[in-house]
Image: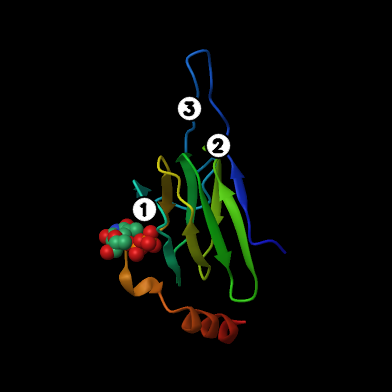
Amino acid sequence: MSLIKWIEFQILGDERGSLVALERERNVPFDIRRVYYIYKTEQGVSRGYHAHRNLRQVAMCVAGSCKMVLDDGFQREEVVMDCPTRGLLIESMMWREMHDFSEDCVLLVLASEPYLESDYIRDYQKFVAECRHEG
Ligand code: TYD
């Protein structure tokens, strides 16, 4: 089964342009408790390299593009993020890496929990071990 779960956002467009609304009851499958965005990423830089024990997220490129790698400890998939009208659902216990940011990339992330460093797993071998143990 694919790790890639897209959420398609309705485009509320008219002659003036486009608008996307993100709302818990409509297109986000959790209560949004935090929003952050990654932008002006230096060329050649990769980010992420961690998983979260509990946190769920929806990530979308509202401008530009980047690549997202997801890994559940058993399989790894890569997708191009380049569309402001669909979000990538990243469940808990999912290793993620972000690569190949365009200069204009703005990666917007909705998160189900406040920032909590103890929720991070930053060591890949430890992550795999926790996945296998749970499985
Ligand atoms: P980090 O999660 O390591 O970024 P990435 O996974 O994109 O490479 O976060 C970078 C820094 O920002 C780190 O010092 C923690 C801090 N941070 C917060 O304070 N709040 C947040 O919501 C996030 C996502 C990060």
Q: Earlier in the sequence, mark 2 or mark 3?
A: 3
Measure the alpha-carbon separation of dots 1 and 2.
Answer: 21 Å
Q: Earlier in the sequence, mark 1 or mark 2?
A: 1
Question: Which circle, 1 or 3, is nearer the viewer?
Answer: 3
Quarter, ligand 1: bottom left
Residue 104 visible, this angle: yes
State the image coordinates of residue 113 (x, y, percent, origin top left).
Answer: 38, 60
Q: Quadrant of residue 118?
A: bottom left
For label 1, the residue is 33
129 sits left or right of 50 in the view: right
Measure the alpha-carbon separation of dots 2 and 3.
Answer: 9 Å
For label 3, the residue is 19
For label 2, the residue is 85
* Front one among 74 and 32: 74
The residue positioned 42% from the left and 50% from the top of the image is 109
Q: Earlier in the sequence, mark 1 or mark 3?
A: 3
Measure the alpha-carbon separation of dots 1 and 3.
Answer: 22 Å
**Residue furthest out toward the top:** 15
**Residue furthest out toward the front:** 44
The residue positioned 42% from the left and 63% from the top of the image is 48
State the image coordinates of residue 1 (x, y, percent, origin top left).
Answer: 72, 64
Question: Height in image: 102 above or below 128?
Answer: above
